Image (cartoon, helix red, strand yellow):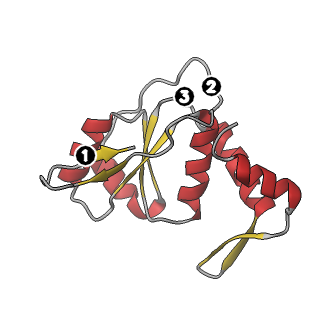
Amino acid sequence: MDLSAFIERAANRTPDKLALHFEGAQVTYASLWKHIVERTESLAVARGDRVAWLGFNDPEMLVLFFALARRGAILVPLNWRLTAAEQKEVLADCSPRLLLASEDFAARKSELSWPEAAAPADRTQGQEEDDALIVYTSGTTGKPKGAV
């Protein structure tokens, strides 16, 4: 069982209950779970892989977060306010298998030109104890550090 299990349970128990309200759109648990399952199938990642995300905090990022958890992979959200050079430092530090971006940040993703790693041989199933998120913080020294 992985972090997304509570969304799956809610989708099974109360499929029509509101899960998200974002910019006027309402998303039920059933719809959210459907998107998570679809996104999981599209991800060529394995347990422990890191996936960088460049975009705003929105439902698309949540779907990615839970889909990665289903594979046992780790989301690394990039701070969209950082410069490309700063984002490259974070990428170099965490070495993600993939760099994904929302449409709003497609040009920046292109500028970062992070090479995609080869797809893993086996798709894995996430476990409850798997790390799910690495957030970078500057801390007291000014150099970004990943906090799991």
Q: Mark on residue 47?
A: 3
Mark 2: few/some/many CA within 10 Å (<14, 14-19, 20+): some
Mark 1 or 2 closer to N-term? 2
Query: Which residue type carries mark 3?
Result: Arg
Q: Where is residue 139 in the image (x, y as percent from the top left)?
A: 21, 55
Residue 52 appears left or right of 144: right
Quadrant housing the N terminus: top right
The front one of 86 and 132 is: 132
Secondary structure under tag 3 reads loop
> Mark 1 or mark 3, which is nearer the start of the sequence?
3
Alpha-carbon distance for marks 1 and 2? 28 Å
Look at the picture and state if 115 lies above or below 121: below
Point out the frontmost of discs 3 and 1: 1
Determine the CA span between mark 3 and mark 2.
8 Å
Between disc 3 and disc 2, the foreground one is 3
Q: Which of marks 1 and 2 is in front?
A: 1
| Residue marked by disc 1 | 145
Name the spot of residue 132 as percent of width and height, x first: 51, 42
Q: Name the residue under label 2.
A: 123
Mark 1 secondary-structure assignment: strand
